[in-house]
Image: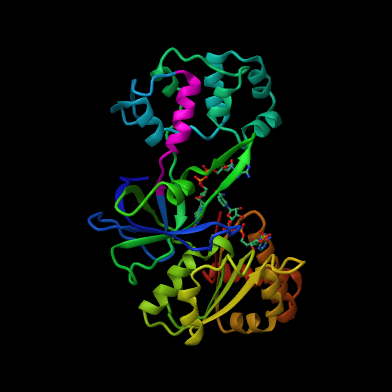
Amino acid sequence: MKNPFPAEVLGVRSVTKPGSAKETIHVDYSLEGSGLSYVTGDALGVLPCNDPALVDALISALGLDATAEVNAPDGSATTLRDALINSYDITTLKKGVLTKWNAVAGSEKLATILADKDALKDFCWGRDLLDLASDPEMKANFTDAAAFVGILGKMNPRLYSIASSPDAVPGQVSLCVGAVRYTSNERKRGGVCSTFMADRIKAGDKVKVFVHTNKNFRLPEDGNTPIIMVGPGTGIAPFRAFWQQRVADNATGPMWLFFGNPYKATDGCYEDEIAPLVESGKLKLSVAWSRDQEYKIYVQNLMEQAGDEIWEWLEKGAAVYMCGDANRMAKDVEKALLSIIATKGGRSEEEAAAYLADMKAAKRYQKDVY
Ligand SMILES: Cc1cc2nc3c(=O)[nH]c(=O)nc-3n(C[C@H](O)[C@H](O)[C@H](O)COP(=O)(O)OP(=O)(O)OC[C@H]3O[C@@H](n4cnc5c(N)ncnc54)[C@H](O)[C@@H]3O)c2cc1C
Ligand SMILES: NC(=O)c1ccc[n+]([C@@H]2O[C@H](COP(=O)([O-])OP(=O)(O)OC[C@H]3O[C@@H](n4cnc5c(N)ncnc54)[C@H](OP(=O)(O)O)[C@@H]3O)[C@@H](O)[C@H]2O)c1
């Protein structure tokens, strides 16, 4: 992260409808005066702030003075409350911070957990420092605010695929963000950065951002090349940038978007922008509403159904892009692609793998998965 720029928030709006199982927001930032530039396909780093309510609860559970002077990670003096809101990580539990905590707490329970790799992993999942401070068996009595801050790591930025083209909206950058919310250990929690953007920023605020170049996620140089974009959920983000870019370039290459989300009624994304592209024949759209029927329908099922046409596009030189969930979706979509190459292209498993490897080498198969 080099010199994050305090970008002005131009607006935050819902993408999905109220009641959506996939609460998704769209954020526009101004890059005016930043000197920052980006290329379609890049990501944006965002430095979030912690939820003030969580910070207050933590300070209170620790019995510390919110106004006590402490150092921020850059050495500047500030109050404990300000430092915990803006500069330190109070939500990620790892061996390092727990070891430092227990040097003060001297908890046998925590020492046992720390000594067992699996128990430690289990313990850290879905817990934060407030859980430690609220557990009588683990509570630490720090001598003062500075001693507590001394055990903390600094706030980490989060990356987001940029959902805009610099040629379509010069001086601006947009994100498409899924709000991470869950209940764990009987407390409702929010992902730091996604709920920072969903709940705690508004137009006019400044948020520290930086551009994270992603040379491995680029549109083909030739605007006539067909592109197939597979982006369920927030995986749609960079593809909004792609279609904006192609329109800005007057590029005529056919585009095919495979999108998926749970329910048609609430979970459509950018439908008002997609509809005119589909109507004008610039974009072919296949949507997998996964929960609108008794059985699941995912993007890869639609790809398999359209195998003949996908194979035709591949043979015409189409580039394939995939964005979104790395754990399950990316693996399943790749399997579907390999199966289409094998069955529709009359190739063995090994030949299909070689075909995809060649596409990758020619930058015709690119992934942005997380
Ligand atoms: C290159 C890249 C591009 C990305 N692009 C996008 C994008 O365009 N849009 C987007 O929305 N995201 C994107 N992400 C993901 C994004 O960076 C963040 O990881 C995401 O927003 C969550 O961050 P957070 O700060 O809200 O959550 P964090 O505060 O980081 O919390 C997440 C953590 O919460 C815990 N957790 C989550 N769910 C549960 C649960 N059910 N039970 C217990 N614990 C749980 C886990 O420890 C998890 O690691 C991208 C990531 C990368 C690497
Ligand atoms: N590493 C990180 O830092 C990080 C942070 C946040 C999110 N993520 C990942 O990013 C993903 C994107 O989140 P999101 O909420 O926008 O969307 P998502 O969870 O990927 O869901 C979008 C759609 O994909 C479907 N789906 C589920 N499993 C699939 C599979 N194996 N193949 C194809 N489609 C599948 C979902 O269906 P159903 O839900 O109906 O099954 C839903 O309709 C999350 O799944 C999460 O794993 C990673």
Name which quarter of the figure residue 72 lies in: top left
Q: Which quarter of the image is occupied by the N terminus?
A: top left
Residue at 61% over, 73% down? 287
Q: Position of residue 31 (x, y in %)?
A: 29, 57
Q: Position of residue 125 (x, y in %)?
A: 63, 36
Asked whether residue 325 is drawn in magenta, I would say: no
Task: Name the quadrant where ligand 2 sits.
Answer: bottom right
Q: Position of residue 301 (x, y in %)?
A: 71, 71
Residue nearest the viewer, comparing 353 with 211: 211
Please say which color scheme the image uses: rainbow
Q: Which quarter of the image is occupied by the C terminus?
A: bottom right
Asked whether residue 61 is drawn in magenta, I would say: yes
Q: Main secondary structure of the magenta part?
A: helix
Left or right, 206 with reference to 259:
left
Q: Magenta segment, which residues?
A: 46-63
Left or right, 38 with reference to 111:
left
Residue at 77% over, 66% down? 294
